Image (tube, rainbow, N blue to C red):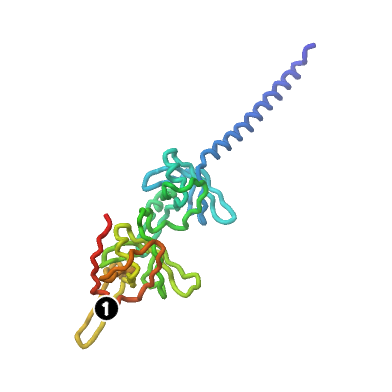
Amino acid sequence: MKKPLAGLLGSTVLSVGVTLGVLAVLGWVLGDLGARSATDVTVTFDQGHGLRVGGQVRCRGIVVGEVSDVRLQVEGVEVDVSLESGARSLLMREDTRWWIDRPMVEWSRVGGLDGAFSDRSIDVDPGPSGGAIVRVFEGLDEPPVLSQYQEGDLSLTLSAASRGSLQRGAAVLYRGVRIGTILETDLAENATSVEARILVERRFAPLVRDNSRFYEAGAFDLDLGFTGVRARLDSLETLMVGGVSLVTPNSPGEVAISGARFDVASEADDDWADWRPRIPLQD
C-alpha cells in the first residue's frame, strides 16, 4: 500500500534533519579536535597585556608561530600557542622562556617599541637543546634583561647592605669595560640585605676568582683637602644607571664557579687600584 505524499515528505524532512544534525555535531567535534591539535604549548601569564588570538610568536626576530587561544583564568591568563613544525623541537624544551613583547622603559634601557605600534606578540628564548620536551610553561612577568644566554656564562649572587647602584640591567665592569649584566635584585630571604643575581660573559669568566672583590659603581666623589680638590667620576652610564665593578688581586685565587656568592663594598679600597693581575681571557 502506498504511503500518502505528506507522509513521504515528512519522513524525508525528518531524515534530512537528522543527517544535518549528525553532520553539525561531527563538524563541531572535528573542529574542536582540530583546534586542540593546533595547540603545541600553553603558557600562563599574570597579565595578558592586550595579547590577542592570531598574535605572532617570535624567536630572535623570526616568526615561528601564532597565538591560537587566550583564556582568562582565576589567577592569570592562559595562552595557547601553535608553532611551526621546524620550531617545535627547538622551543618545546624545558627552561624555554616566554614573555609578551610590550613597551618597557627602564633606567638601563628602552625596549618593546615594536609592541607600541602593532598588535602584541610573544617572544621566546629556547632552552638547552638537551632539555626535556614540555608543553606547559610559566611566562615571564617582564622581558628578561638578556634574551640569550651562552654555555659557559658565569652566574653569581652578590650581597649588599642596600640596593644602591645594583640596578636591574646595569653593567658589571672590569677596568671600566662591561663584562656582564645585573639580571635582577631583591631582598634576601631574611630581609637583612639585598641580593643581586649577575651574569658574567663566558669570555670574561676567568677574571672572577674566589678572592675577587666587588664594589658599587656609578659614584661621584668630591674631596676637598690641603692638597687640593680630588674628584672621581665614573662613566655617564654608570652614574645614571648604576652598576658594580670587579677587581682581582695580583695573586688570583681559584676560578669562581656558577652559584658563588660575593659581598659588595660601597666603595673601592685605595690599594685595589694597584691590582693588575695577568689573566688570559677565553676565546
The quadrant of the rendering that contains the C terminus is bottom left
* 246 left or right, relative to 46: left
What residue is disc 1 on? Answer: 270
Provide residue 67's location: percent of width, then percent of height.
48, 45
Residue at position x 55%, y 49% in the image: 71
Q: How many C-alpha atoms fall within 10 Å of the one at disc 1: few (<14), some, or many (≥20)?
A: few
Q: Which residue is the extreme one toward the left?
A: 227
Q: Which residue is the extreme one toward the bottom?
A: 226
Secondary structure category for the residue under label 1: helix
Residue 237 visible in the current orientation: yes
The quadrant of the rendering that contains the N terminus is top right
* 81 left or right, relative to 27: left
Position above or below: 71 against 185: above
User: Which quarter of the picture shows residue 16?
Assistant: top right
Residue at position x 26%, y 69% in the image: 235
Of residues 159 and 122, the one drawn nearer to the viewer in this rendering:
159
Provide residue 96's location: percent of width, then percent of height.
45, 50
- How many marks are shown on the rendered structure? 1
Residue 123 visible in the current orientation: no
Of residues 196 and 145, the one drawn nearer to the viewer in this rendering:
196
Q: Tell me which amino acid carries mark 1.
A: Asp
Of residues 22 and 33, the one drawn nearer to the viewer in this rendering:
33
Q: Which residue is the extreme one toward the right?
A: 1
Residue at position x 44%, y 39% in the image: 84
Position above or below: 173 against 57: below
Provide residue 11's location: percent of width, then percent of height.
73, 21
